[in-house]
Image (cartoon, rainbow, N blue to C red):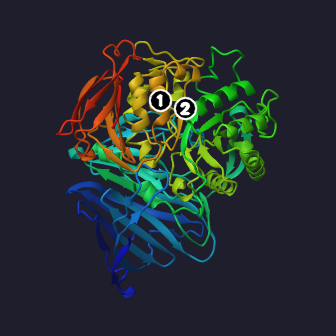
Amino acid sequence: MKKTLTILFSFLLASWGTQAKDFNLSSPDGRLKATVKVAQTMSYTLTYDGQVILQPSQVSLKIADRATWGVNSKFKRGKVSQHKGAIRPLFYKKNVISDNYRQLSLEFGEFNLVFRAYDEGLAYRFVSTRQKEFNVEDELAEFNFAKDFGTWTPYVRDNKSLKDMLHNSFENCYDEISISQFDKKRLAFLPLIVKADNGVRLIIAESDVEDYPCMFLKSGNQPTGFKSLFAPYPKEVRQGGHNQLEQFVTKAENYIAKSKGMRTFPWRIIGVSDNDGDILNNDMVYRLASPSRLTDTSWIKPGKVAWEWWNHWGLYKVDFKAGINTRTYKYYIDFAARQGIEYVILDEGWAVNKKADLFQILPEIDLPEIVRYANGKGVGIILWAGYKAFDRDMEKACKYFSEMGVKGFKIDFMNRNDAECVDFHYRAAQLAAKYHLLCDFHGTFAPTGLNRTYPNVINFEGVNGQEQNKWATIKEYNQVQYDVTVPFARMFAGQMDYTQGAMINATRQTYAPNNYRPMSQGTRCHQLAEYVVFFSPLNMLCDSPTHYEENPECTEFIARIPVIWDETIPLKSEIGEYVAVARRSGQKWYVGAITNWTPRDLTLDLGPLKVAGKTATVYEDGPNAYIFAEDWAKREVLIPADGKLQVHLAPGGGVAIKI
């Protein structure tokens, strides 16, 4: 699968200092071209189809002995290589990832600087060749764009101070602003989309972040640029926040990371596309992550989850009082078993509140009996755990609950991305894998490839998901608008635990937040389509079993849909307007399309699926869905010879198709 062709360019050290050196690197298809300038300060420029995207953008790494890699660094030699290969991912949106790139490696005294050009984007990283340990004081990653392009910017929500912004849940909607309009007092988290001329989109992201903080973006030194900011390494933390489960940094060091001598640093990524739909199939983050460190992954089971927190343990038409108790969970287990749903989550509430102790369990919960009952029905139990509670007893908890028969943890409220917190994710993933436990990280940053390195990390939040409908007005959270933006932005980084599946649905006029009987914004078929559009190997059924039992056809579609895929084919889509995608599992194709509050008549070109003449089951908005969002219809159609299928989407609507 792999073939490497290496061309070596050597340069005499004596020539250094007399003039700058430029290295050119292009993607395999030749459309993306980078020029890397080795000079007093290291920088690079980027063009796509001849259009200048990035003007000179500086890169450097400042280490604690006052040296700054990339500034006045003694250059030794450069090497250009070409690689052709493939990656077979686990639990992903396709079963083969092409791994074709051209690479430029620049060697200096104590470090290398590596650039890779793919057809889908450019990436670079620093590599330490230093023998002794050191601290990294800072890193500069500039993104100086050629014009005042537009963006879809995910600001950090809390913006009172820098300290507040560094502690956040990485959840917010997207501000559609130009680069020059970026608030100089605020930070944005990744991924962030820039819209260049001629339909070209750039996505700033990162991968393989280990023993290092994740990157924020702030307003750059140039009027049309961004630059990096990193949380400093914690010196002291205090327990507090939500139910005493968070850990707040009270004092910080004057560096951002502790580093072993020889190591790699995170990849900085600029994804590129001239077709919005193709962003949905970009693999840059996954392919640049470190390969799996698990020798046995046969025990890892993706699947769907009957989930109680969003619907507030919302059972009725039962002969007991629903709530956080054993009988309620047995009902959820019975429902999951009947529908072939793999898991039930015990979300927040099963352990005694404000103790941050997973071994203090409510007396109403007989956890060993719940786990025994679930396993007997072929249903796995996943336990919710707050950050502090899990961190304080990590190995003890993993060992104890694994021996009980629990299948995984949903770990929540980290709300930081400094190097110590990033390290927590790796430690949690490694220990969980030791005891054959899944991890679903909530209250955390978007994935940076940990799901490839530890495939038992099956899902992440870092998304402004449907939970917001329990408390947010439509002005505070325009869910339908968010839904047609987030697949191109946050989902660029990887899977997301958005928690769809609402059976109470609302139009723009009828929606209202409700903690006890929450509803979705948009139509029923918008919810169904999200199971295709959104990628999530551990996928929630957010609503009450009572509601699902009253809607058997919708429930059957949700319960039977795959969560990992053999192939993904994006269909015509437009960021912020509508999304359409097709995914294949085995011999079955699923197609999903959703729109914002604008109704649309779409022509779905299914020609690439090669399904002409086959029967499709179409779940679509009913004729009155613009008033009653629960109105939907089901029909059987033959895919025409030209593969083109006409569908209508109501305001906030969607369509889901099984072929």
Q: Position of residue 123 (x, y in %)?
A: 39, 61
Q: Neighbour class for label 1 at 10 Å: few (<14), some, many (≥20)?
A: some
Q: Is residue 21 left or right of residue 457?
A: left
Give amino acid for label 2: Gln
Q: Residue at x 34, y 82 (%)?
A: 8
Can you identify the residue that label 1 sits on? 556
Q: Quadrant of residue 540?
A: top right
Q: Quadrant of the N terminus?
A: bottom left
Q: Are marks 2 and 1 in contact (CB under 8 Å)?
A: yes
Measured in 3D between alpha carbons, the distance from the residue under mark 2 to the one under mark 1, in whole angstroms, is 7 Å
SS assignment at label 2:
helix
- Residue 412 lies, with reference to residue 626, above or below; the image says below
Q: Quadrant of residue 43?
A: bottom left
Give amino acid for label 1: Glu
Q: Position of residue 488 (x, y in %)?
A: 37, 42
Can you identify the residue that label 2 sits on? 339
